[in-house]
Each structure stands twice: as structure tokens, then as C-alpha cells.
Amino acid sequence: MDMYVVIGGGSAGYVAGSVLGREGKEVVVIEKGKFGGVCVNSGCVPSIFLSDISFLFSRLNEIGNYKGLEISVTDSKGNFFSKRNEIIEYLSNAGKELVKNSGAEVIEGEAKIVSPNEVEVEGKRISFDKLIIATGSIPLKPSIKGIERAISEDEAVNLNYVPSSLVVIGGGYAGVEIAQIYARLGSEVTLITRGKIMKYLDEDGQKIIKDSLEWDGVELIENCEVEEIREQEVVTKKGMRKKGEIVVYATGRKPNFPKGIDKLGIKYNDNGIVVNDLLQTTNSRVYSAGDVIDKEKKVAHVAMLEGIISALNSSGKMERIDYFSVPQVVYTDPQIGIVGNRKLAVKECKFPLSATTRAIIKGLREGYAKIGVDEKGKIVYGEVVADVAEELVNELAIAIKAGMTCKDLALTALVHPSLSESMINACRGFFNLDVDRFKDKNA
Ligand SMILES: Cc1cc2nc3c(=O)[nH]c(=O)nc-3n(C[C@H](O)[C@H](O)[C@H](O)COP(=O)(O)OP(=O)(O)OC[C@H]3O[C@@H](n4cnc5c(N)ncnc54)[C@H](O)[C@@H]3O)c2cc1C
């Protein structure tokens, strides 16, 4: 029987190993740290846990006012940090147990590639017929004087206290999320970014995030570089000095290649391992999945799908990866969800949450759903700004994957009252059927 080796027990690796285990293959999953990888231990799980807590702190009073309730929320003991740690522990263990439960073997230690068909872990050699590399990514340390005083984004979401002041360097997904979380928990936060904040978003999205950060008291400094990190202080190239008990760099990530990768004769570059749409590398016995791949969307849900596809293909199937319908979310408040490719849209319609009954009941004033279609009316882009954009954008991802047109969605009944109605109303806008909003007579 063929021997399969999966290196890495993160989002991609634990899924790939489990799929092969369930197929009855002889497979080992090798993990050098904790199962669940970045997502569970220092990414999605801790950051979204803290985001939920900071959302509660910030919103309950506001919603209380809106709905005529008196609400007071305090957590002077920071008990939520231990709850976060408990959840991480639970999910990491669950990941390992799921792999074992599938029938795969788990080996703990660092895998090194020692020949074209062998890896070595803790001095023990394991031969493989098929290899899946799922070794993820690590934070990219910027070259700034004093950077050793700063912590990475992975460490920032695992702090066990709320610092009095925090400087975040980097205005991408992780930077803005971390800035907002700690501002809401009580830190004095400065966010410094070399260019514009969230450059992947259009101006609407950037404005929403800027307004939201401003509302939370985050000082945002764009188009500015950090020159030096000193004890409790950051100095910018423009000569500004900002107080930072903690300084966080959220300046991107780089692929984490396993040692000895060159023995496999596969192609890779600064952004990762080169694969085709079957997730096969330039060596037909070696597949790769997750953040270590050379690709655009480095998120956990893609890593998990790649885990499935790399496992199926390494065992003889021919499933192709489709990145077009992959949604992405910025976990700020409000959240911003995007899916598809705006450049392919020839027409767009937008519907505000303020005209959506469920949003009015909830007390949500900002946000919208925007749909973009191609010349045939097929939905090719979706953008949702709402407190649950994470769920709404998934619905648009399904619509895009299914090849639906805006007419299909416009003539679909979704539950009333629900936030999802903002999306069908955006589609109804293409046909002048968005009757829940006041029409702009000048448009
Ligand atoms: C702060 C933050 C927030 C995030 N939030 C989100 C979010 O909300 N939603 C989302 O979708 N994504 C989010 N991400 C991204 C997400 O965490 C990654 O896309 C995902 O973890 C990638 O999974 P992976 O399996 O490719 O890699 P990883 O999770 O990095 O797992 C790789 C694993 O391989 C192991 N490993 C590496 N080398 C070896 C070796 N030689 N031998 C043995 N084991 C090895 C590592 O220890 C690790 O456990 C976030 C990331 C960060 C940093």
C-alpha cells in the first residue's frame, strides 16, 4: 500500500490527513508545534474571540440606549483571556483527535526532507510514496531598528492583559483587527501604515473602516513609515513619537518551507510553493496545501478546502481548486465581506442596511450590500458591510459558485425580517424593484 506523509497539522494538514485516513490510506501527519496551526492557536480563533468580547463591551451600551435598556458591562478581572485559552486548547486537541479518529497516525516533531522520498522526524526516517506539504506561514519581520522589542500579530492576539498603550504597524487585515480589538478593550491605540489602510478594499470599504477606527479612538497614521522602536515608544520617519507599551508588527507573512525542500526538486518562490490547479507541485508525487502555496488568498477556509483537494488528488482523483468564489472577511465592526472579482463587474447595485427592516430592529445604522454583475447579469462580485458579513458573504459565495444571475436572486424570497434581504434588495435594484428604499429622484 502507498505510504502518505502530511507535514503540518494546521488547517490544511489536519484536513488532508483526516481525508486520507478516512479513505483507508496509510498516512502519518507530522506536527512540530500544536495541532490547529496558526488559525486555532494564534490566528482566527483568538482574534475572533477577542473581537467578539470587544464588540460586546462596545456595543451593549449603545444598543441599550437604542432599545431603551440600562446595561452595564465590566470585566475588571480579564477572565475572558482564560476562556480564550481554554477554547484554543480544546480546538487544538480536537484537531489532533480528529486526525487519529480518521485512522491516520500522528507524529509530533519537526519533519525535515532528507531525500526525494524520505522525511526525518526526531532522528527517525519515514519513506513516502506521496507527500503533502502543509507547513503554513510565519510573520514577516520588518527591518526596523529595535524590532526585537515588538511582537508579531500571532503574539498580539495571545496577550493575557490589556496594555495601556499599543502601537500597531501595518494596516492590513490583522493590523486593523488588532487595533480595534485593543482600543475597545481600553488601550490607547495608534495604527501606523506605510500606504493606505486596507488597500485591498475600494474607497467605500476603506472609509467604513476609517470611520469605525476613529469612533473607537484609534489614531490612524497613513503613508508613514516607522523608523525606530524604543522602550515604550515608536518614532516615525516623519519625526512623530507614539506611546507604545506594546508594539505589534502586522506587516505580512512569508511561507514556511520545511528544511530540505530542495531535495524534492520542486519549484517555489518568495510567495510559496508553485502548484497547479490540482495542487500538485512540479514533482508529481508531491502536493501542497494552505498558506505555504504561492497564491493570493491565504485564509483558513481555503487551506481546509485545499487540504481536501490535495488529499483526494494525491490518491488518484482529479478535483480542481476554484478560488473565484472564495469569500474574505475583515473582522472589524462592522465586518466587511467580499467575494468574486470587482473588475469583472460591468454594473453594480447597492442597498443600505438602514433600509433593511432587520437592521433597523437591531439598531444597525451603517452598512450595505453591493452586488456586481457581468454583461449577462451573472453575479461576479459581492460586498457586504454588516455586523454579520461573515454569514451574508457566504450566501453570495454560494450564489457565485452556482453561477446565479442577479435576476435569480432578485426573484428569490428570503426570510423577513433578515439582514440577508439587503442582498436580494441589491439585486432587485438592477430591475427597479428595490421598493424598500427611497428612490433618488436625481439618479
Ligand atoms: C492574527 C491572524 C488572524 C487570522 N484570522 C483569520 C480569519 O479570521 N479567517 C481566516 O480564514 N484566516 C485567518 N487567518 C489566516 C489563517 O490562520 C491561515 O490562513 C491558516 O492558519 C493557514 O493554515 P495552514 O494549515 O496553511 O498553515 P498553519 O496554520 O500555519 O499550519 C501549519 C502547521 O505546520 C506546522 N509545521 C510547519 N513546519 C513543520 C515541519 N517542518 N514539521 C512539522 N510541522 C510543521 C506548524 O507548526 C503549523 O502547525 C488569520 C491569521 C492570523 C495571523
Image: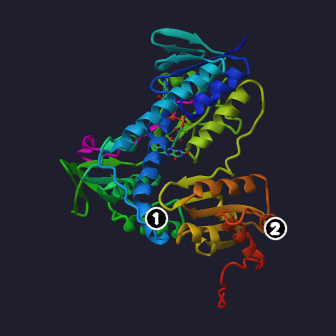
Q: Quadrant of the C terminus?
A: bottom right
Closer to us: 421 or 236: 421
Instruction: Characterize the local packing of mark 2: few (<14), some (14-19) or many (20 or more) Cα atoms within 10 angstroms.
Output: few
Q: Percent from the top left, x then y, of residue 379? A: 74, 62
- The answer to whether 366 appears left or right of 16 in the picture is left
Q: Is mark 1 within 8 Å of ligand 1?
A: no
Pointer 1 residue: 209
- The image's mark for residue 411 is 2
Q: Amino acid at mark 1?
A: Ile
Instruction: Pick whichever, 146 or 181, lies toward us.
Output: 181
Horizontal arrangement in the rendering, residue 58 relative to residue 77 (left or right):
right
Q: How would you classify the magenta stretch by its main secondary structure?
A: loop
Taking the spot 71% from the left edge, 66% from the top edge, the residue there is: 416
Q: Look at label 2 and name its amino acid.
A: Leu
Question: Which stretch appears magenta?
Answer: 134-150
Asked which secondary structure carries label 2, the reply is: loop
Write down the quadrant of residue 185 in the picture: bottom left
Residue 142, magenta (yes or no): yes
Residue found at x 44% / y 61%: 60
Residue 82, percent from left and from top: 38, 37
